[in-house]
């Protein structure tokens, strides 16, 4: 589990623990897990968050970016 902060252009959408964040980068799906190497990227299409248990929340987006240092993940999006 790692800390996730998900912010849209209008509001904070989620702040809490996540098991996995899936995003699309250059038309390729990428999964961010705990202890991921430091990473920053422009994202597109959608963000899927796997929280504690098996609940998965998907959010359709226009564009955004993701940054992680392995312990925290920040996702800033512009929703459709």
Image: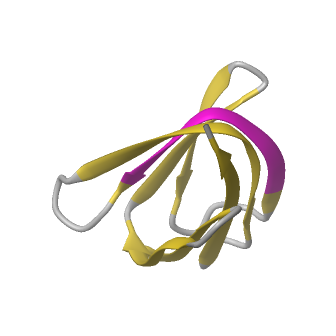
Q: Is residue 3 above or below residue 56?
A: below
Front in this rendered view, residue 31 or 76? 76
The residue at the point 60 percent across, 79 percent down is 71
The residue at the point 67 percent across, 69 percent down is 74
Q: Position of residue 22 (x, y in %)?
A: 51, 43
Tell me if 13 is positioned left or right of 66 in this view. left
Front in this rendered view, residue 44 or 67? 44
Q: Position of residue 41 (x, y in %)?
A: 82, 47
Tell me if 38 is positioned left or right of 79 in this view. right
Assign the N terminus to one quadrant of the image.
bottom left
Q: Quadrant of residue 45?
A: top right
Q: Position of residue 10 (x, y in %)?
A: 65, 66
Q: Is residue 45 above or below residue 58?
A: above
Magenta stretch contains residue 21: no
Assign the C terminus to one quadrant of the image.
top right
Q: Quadrant of residue 43?
A: top right
Please state the extent of the stretch shown in magenta in the rendering: 40-49
Q: Quadrant of residue 8?
A: bottom right
Tell me if 54 is positioned left or right of 69 in this view. left
Q: Position of residue 21 (x, y in %)?
A: 49, 52
Q: Is residue 69 above or below residue 80?
A: below
Front in this rendered view, residue 57 or 71? 57
How many labels sit on residues? 0
Type of colouring: secondary structure
Q: Is residue 1 visible?
A: no
The residue at the point 83 percent across, 56 percent down is 40
């Amino acid at each position: 589990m790692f800390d996730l902060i998900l912010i849209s252009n209008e509001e904070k959408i989620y702040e809490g623990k996540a098991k996995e964040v899936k995003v699309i980068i250059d038309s390729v799906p990428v999964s961010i897990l705990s202890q991921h190497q430091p990473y920053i990227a422009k994202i597109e299409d959608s963000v899927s968050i796997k929280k504690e248990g098996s609940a998965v929340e998907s959010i359709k987006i226009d564009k955004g970016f993701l940054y992680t240092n392995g312990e925290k993940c920040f996702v800033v999006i512009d929703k459709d």
